[in-house]
Image (tube, rainbow, N blue to C red):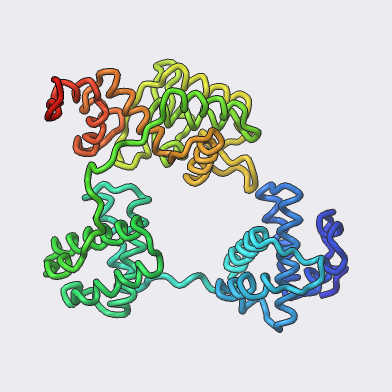
Amino acid sequence: MAISQLEIAMDLIHSMHPLARAWLLDGPLSSFVDAFQALLERGRYAEGSSVAALRGWSHFAHWMTKCQLSAEQIDEALVGQFLDSHLPRCDCHPAALRTRGDVSASLGHLLALLREQHVIVELPGPSGPVAEELTRYNVHMRDARGLAIGTRGDRLACISLLLQCKVAGKAIAIGALQPEDVRGFMATELTRVSSASHASAVTAALRAYFRYRGTCGDAVNGLLGAISSPVRWSQASLPRALTAEEVQRLEAHCAQAKRAPLRLLAMVRLALDLGLRVGEIAKLEITDFDWRAGTVTLKRTKSQRQDVLPLPAVTGQALSEYMRHERPATTLPSLFVRRVAPHDRPIGVDTVSQAIGRALRGAGISRSCHSLRHTLACRLVNSGSSIKEVADVLRHRSLDTSLIYAKLDLQLLAEVALPWPGSAS
């Protein structure tokens, strides 16, 4: 296909270096350039982002030409080979984009586009008995356990790996598994991701699944006995809350933020005044707020319940300022929507977590996002609220989860403190 037939009436391609443009329009990805430009237009990507994406495609197409590869051969492994092997030692013309983040993002779009057009196959997933088992277990977690979609997804991913490794292509017979199989699987997983949090997630997922299989009639006592959890003592630490001075610094930093200060302050106020989790903040919709009654209804919570909370005036003011002056024009019901391409999409949990995390670091506070939730709980305890009231505000299912805040009730602790041996009192 001649270049003249592929010329696009956009200035972006014409603004590229002639050599990079030739790599793109003469290479193995030339027939997908139109579709790629349409994708960039739908997402309303900024000009700089679109140029970087096209340059990333161009560099990859040049490498494919040198390696005599076709579009049908592209997959995650080939992209990984380009990023990990070629890019660090690239000696291509300076017109080639070498920024790993930009190149990786553009190739992610490439993989999605090729799958959308059925040029390459979809990623293989579980099938047959394994897929059916995962579907049944997902229904059990949703209907019998009431677990949130994120928790279900994490556990299904772990169990999928176990089943595909141990019983792929066979009927599901968990009772036939041996403790050595479980220990071997856990060792492999912890070698892949070596962290205490991942170890806890794996053991929790396996234990919950085997208990479910126990209700199905399988003998799972031996398998449960093979699961050893990492040591994490309950109630061993104090909640890390912000001081009043740190809260003031955080609010001041939000007001002075260069990027979306009103949105950032609204997110911080929701966490600080209502104790919302980052996932709950990301999922809020405008219709969740009753402005006349001064309440917010949480419908998409971790515990799958619907909770109605009072909306403090200072929080409502922060939300009002954001919606009037900073919220992008969109038909989406989501309270917080993307400010960068792809537009007209809700923000994700990571966006909230990263925004609040950057604000905390910018204010010189070495705490996590969850510390804002701790701050609300500590403020309630120190103002005389009971542990039951704290549990209600934080929407804990069990009072045991809230007991850690009893350590911060200094007034009541002083009443039960015993005199130190040898002291005057």
Q: Is residue 134 left or right of residue 267?
A: left
Residue 329 visible = no
Residue at 30 percent of width and 28 percent of height: 393
The extreme bottom residue here reads: 68
Position of residue 385 measured from the top left corner of the image (x, y, whole percent): 25, 21
In which quadrant will I find the N terminus? bottom right
Q: Is residue 47 above or below residue 8?
A: above
Residue drawn 22% across and 20% down?
411
Residue 36 vs residue 257, the one in the foreground: 257
Q: Is residue 294 left or right of residue 141?
A: right
Is residue 80 or residue 26 the one in the foreground?
80
**Which quadrant is the C terminus positioned in?**
top left
Q: Position of residue 354 (x, y in %)?
A: 52, 43
Depth check, front residue: 194 or 163: 194
Asked if residue 292 is positioned above or below residue 254 in the image, the reply reads above
Determine the image quadrant of residue 84: bottom right
* Residue 298 rendering spot, x and y as whole percentages: 37, 33
Residue 382 placement: quadrant? top left
How many numbered tags mark residues here?
0
Res 371 seen here:
yes
Horizontal and vertical percent position of residue 214 = 14, 63
Q: Residue at x 82, y 71 (%)?
A: 93
- Left or right? Give the position of 357 relative to 388: right
